[in-house]
Amino acid sequence: MSYIIDRRLNGKHKSSVNRQRFLRRYREHIRKAVEEAVNERSIKDLDRGEKITIPQKDIHEPTFGHGQGGTGSIVHPGNKEFSTGDRIPKPRGGAAGGSGNGDASDSGEGEDDFVFQISQEEFLDYVFEDLALPNLLKKELKEIKEYSLKHAGIVSDGTPSKLNIVRSMRNAYARRMVMNGGARRELKEVEAEMARLMAVDFALRDSAKVTALEEQIEMLKQKIDRTPFLDTYDLRYNHHIKEPKPSSQAVMFCVMDVSGSMTQETKNIAKRFFILLYLFLRRNYEKIDVVFIRHHTSAKEVSEEEFFYSRETGGTIVSSALTLMDKIIADRYPSDAWNIYTAQASDGDNWDDDSTTCRKILEDNIIDKVQYFTYIEITPREHQSLWYAYEQVQSAHPKYFSMRHITEVGDIYPVFRDLFQRRQNESSGQ
């Protein structure tokens, strides 16, 4: 039996194998630190690495030692505080913990907590561990690779439907010119000779030579006529090759409310949620489109930069965003060929009866086309009208529609993981 030992180094002479073993051992500590980091970081720093601190007591490894054995009693002189069976409390601060908040001491020793750095890749691995787009397998099983035919020159073999008439006739003309060139020149010379003989007076004309020239002319004409006008050798065909069409298997619609009722804090929470979603999609899925939609009284499709940094605001008509989304799906993303996902963030405040309109658009036009629709309501207050309208959609379509409530920054990551937690038998991505 052979064993392969991986001794590759992972920078600064550190073993990659030992590092991975260490990360697996303290996975829970790292995941907790990563969750805290995601909630505390600024929007721009969500994807960088992180320093992880593990308490010294948690990395202590037990050891076996040899004692005196047996049962005995020891009397320590000067004991005025304890009797048999008393428990002695641990000393506070100083030597016990290290890196603590205790007062300074002139005695004792201890150890600092263990601190190490995880890379950006490792950080994102923990952030998006066990997450997946729900119901993606439904369309993957039906996927058919599409190709487009690309012109790749001219070939001598092919099907009649791909015959290149111009190139074929050009080849036929060139072939006839080459094959009959000598005969045509000879015919021209013989005909010129015949013309000179015919110009001579009939009494002086050499009739035998005229007969020979006439036979030669006829023979040359027959030779030229026997040359086929179009030969299989002349035929040329257009050649096409199959080129895979670049296509995305899934599209995510990011819909964000930027109306005046959304405070700056609420917008920042929504942006943090969408940045997490965007990082998750780009990291876990190779083929996916992301469509950004901002709305107040009207909705428009915007670029990534405008989605996160534009300051435009106004009133609130949520149905404008759903109507625009439905139009984009009809124009560019047919549901029979695409996995369609939606993430919508709002404070739930909406204009008059527009929440009822939103529910109707979802139930009539959108919910049957999407694989998964998520709605997060960001408000410290009670639920708004949009929440109650969407509850009816969720009760009718629990597999394809999910709702969550966020009140503060600390709720973002747990809600995100809850919405996109990998289900049983769920696909792992593309």
Image: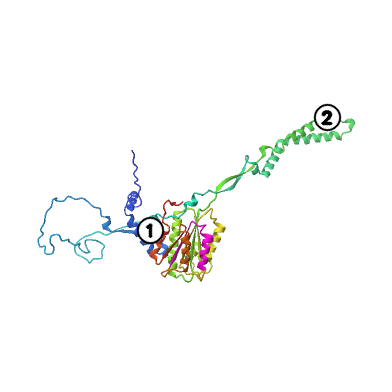
**Residue at label 1?**
49
- SS at circle 2: helix
Measuring 86% from the left and 29% from the top, which residue is drawn there? 207
The label on residue 211 is 2
Task: Please give left or right for residue 165 compared with residue 322 in the image.
Answer: right
**Residue 360 falls within the magenta-colored stretch:** yes
Q: State the residue in front, 71 or 174.
A: 71
Q: State the residue in front, 290 or 357.
A: 357
Measuring 33% from the left and 58% from the top, which residue is drawn there? 52
Q: Amino acid at mark 1?
A: Gly
Q: State the residue in front, 11 or 88.
A: 88
- SS at circle 1: loop
Residue 112 lies, in percent from the top left, at: 26, 59
Task: Please give left or right for residue 49 compared with residue 341 in the image.
Answer: left
125 w.r.t. 377: above or below: above
Residue 424 lies, in percent from the top left, at: 41, 52
Asked whether residue 190 is in view, the answer is yes
**Residues drawn in magenta:** 354-378
Q: Quadrant of the N terminus?
A: top left
